[in-house]
C-alpha cells in the first residue's frame, strides 16, 4: 500500500485482533466502534480513534469492516461513502451473496472500490494472524490490498465479481456447523452405549469420520469442559440461515442445512444469546443424559 494508514470499523472479538495485527505490521490504524469498551481496547492497542464512521472516511483512503450482520454493514456503508477521502472498502464480514452485491453498488456509486474478504479461522486465527481470507475483487485492486491481507493470514481468491467470496464462505461455514452438530450427535450415541468419549474420538480420528470438530473443537473445548471455541452460536445460526436463503434464491433446497439451523436455534434457546458454538454438544449431552468428558491427563490439540 502506498498509504500506510488504514481505517477499521468493528472492533469485536474478530475485528480487534485483526486491527492489532495490522498495527504489528506497521500500519497506522484509525478505528471506530459503537462500543465504549471496544474503543478503549483499541486505543490501548495503539489505534487512533475516530469520532464516527464519517470522520474515519474523511481521514483515510482504505477502510476495513468487521461487522456482525448485513444490515449493519449496509448502514455503515451509507455513512462511510459520504467521506471525502475513502477510496476503497475491505469487508471482512460474512453478509451473504446478495448483500455483498448490494454493498458493492452502494460504494461504487461514489467511485469507491469494493473488496470482499470474509474470513475463516475464528478468534484464535484472528489473534495469530493465520486466518483464511476468501477474497473477491477487481484484478486491478489485488496488488494494492495484498499486503494488508498478508498481515491477517492466507489469501484465496474466489474471483472478481461481488458475492463470490461470500458464496464460498457460506458453504464453508455451513459445513463447519454441520460437522460439529453431527459429531456431537454421534459421540453422544457412542458415549451413551458405553464407549469412553476420548476413546471414541481416537477411533473416529483414525477412520473416515474424522473432521475439524472431532480433531479440534470437541477434544479441546467439549471434553475439557471449556466450551470456548470463540465463535458465537448465534453468528453460526446467522451464517447457516444466510446459506439456506441464498440457496433458496437460486432454487436449491438444503434440507440438511435446515436441520443444522434448527439445532443451532435450540442451542441459543437453551444456553442464551452468548452461547458458544460448542454449546451444541451440551444440548446433546442433556438429551442423552451423558457427559462428554476427556481423560484427566489429556493435552490440548493444536489447531
Image (cartoon, grey):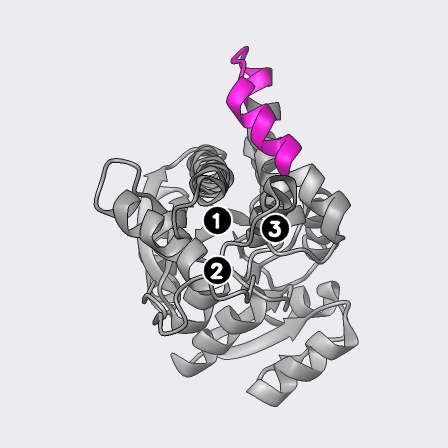
Q: Is mark 1 on a helix, strand or loop?
A: loop
Crowdedness near tag 3: few (<14), some (14–19) or many (≥20) residues, C-alpha within 10 Å: many
Along the viewing direction, whichever of 27 and 177 lies nearer the viewer: 177
Give the CA separation, mark 2 to mark 3: 11 Å
Determine the residue positioned at 55% across, 30% down: 243
Determine the residue positioned at 36% across, 59% down: 144
Give the CA separation, mark 1 to mark 2: 34 Å
x, y percentage for residue 252?
Answer: 51, 13
Can residue 102 be seen from the camera position used here?
Answer: no
x, y percentage for residue 210?
Answer: 30, 42
Outermost residue toward the left in this view: 206
Residue that numbered label 3 is attached to: 282
Q: Which mark is residue 233?
A: none
| Quadrant for the N terminus in the image | bottom left
Q: Examine the rendered structure and indicate whether residue 280 appears above or below residue 22.
A: above
**Residue range (magenta):** 247-263
Depth-wise, is mark 1 or mark 2 nearer the camera?
2
Q: Which mark is residue 293?
A: 2
Q: Which corner quadrant of the image does residue 208 belong to?
A: top left
Q: What element carries label 2?
A: loop
Counting residues from the start of the chain, the first of labels 3 and 1 encountered is 1
Q: Is mark 3 on a helix, strand or loop?
A: helix
Magenta-span inclusion, residue 199 = no
x, y percentage for residue 145?
Answer: 39, 59
Along the viewing direction, whichever of 256 and 115 lies nearer the viewer: 256
- Would residue 236 be found to the left or right of residue 192 on screen? right
Crowdedness near tag 1: few (<14), some (14–19) or many (≥20) residues, C-alpha within 10 Å: many
Along the viewing direction, whichever of 44 and 200 lies nearer the viewer: 200
x, y percentage for residue 147?
Answer: 34, 66
Amino acid at each position: 500500500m502506498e498509504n500506510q494508514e488504514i481505517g477499521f470499523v468493528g472492533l469485536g472479538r474478530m475485528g480487534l485482533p485483526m486491527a492489532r495485527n495490522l498495527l504489528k505490521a506497521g500500519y497506522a490504524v484509525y478505528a471506530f466502534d459503537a462500543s465504549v469498551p471496544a474503543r478503549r481496547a483499541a486505543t490501548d492497542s495503539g489505534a487512533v480513534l475516530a469520532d464516527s464512521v464519517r470522520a474515519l472516511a474523511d481521514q483515510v483512503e482504505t477502510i476495513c469492516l468487521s461487522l456482525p450482520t448485513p444490515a449493519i454493514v449496509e448502514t455503515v456503508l451509507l455513512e462511510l461513502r459520504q467521506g471525502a477521502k475513502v477510496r476503497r472498502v475491505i469487508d471482512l464480514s460474512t453478509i451473504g451473496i446478495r448483500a455483498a452485491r448490494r454493498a458493492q453498488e452502494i460504494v461504487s456509486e461514489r467511485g469507491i472500490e469494493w473488496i470482499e474478504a470474509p474470513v475463516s479461522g475464528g478468534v484464535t486465527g484472528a489473534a495469530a494472524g493465520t486466518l483464511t481470507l476468501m477474497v473477491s475483487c477487481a484484478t486491478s485492486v489485488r496488488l494494492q490490498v495484498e499486503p494488508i491481507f498478508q498481515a491477517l493470514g492466507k489469501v484465496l481468491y474466489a474471483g472478481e465479481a461481488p458475492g463470490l467470496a461470500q458464496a464460498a464462505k457460506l458453504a464453508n461455514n455451513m459445513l463447519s456447523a454441520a460437522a460439529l452438530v453431527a459429531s456431537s450427535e454421534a459421540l453422544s450415541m457412542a458415549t451413551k452405549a458405553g464407549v469412553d468419549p476420548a476413546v471414541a474420538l481416537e477411533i473416529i480420528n483414525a477412520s473416515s469420520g474424522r473432521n475439524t470438530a472431532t480433531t479440534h473443537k470437541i477434544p479441546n473445548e467439549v471434553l475439557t469442559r471449556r466450551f470456548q471455541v470463540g465463535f458465537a452460536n448465534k453468528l453460526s445460526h446467522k451464517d447457516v440461515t444466510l446459506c439456506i436463503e441464498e440457496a433458496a434464491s437460486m432454487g436449491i433446497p438444503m434440507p440438511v442445512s435446515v436441520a443444522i439451523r434448527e439445532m443451532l436455534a435450540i442451542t441459543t434457546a437453551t444456553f442464551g444469546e452468548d452461547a458458544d458454538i460448542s454449546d451444541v454438544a451440551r444440548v446433546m449431552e442433556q438429551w442423552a443424559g451423558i457427559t462428554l468428558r476427556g481423560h484427566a491427563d489429556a493435552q490440548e490439540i493444536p489447531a
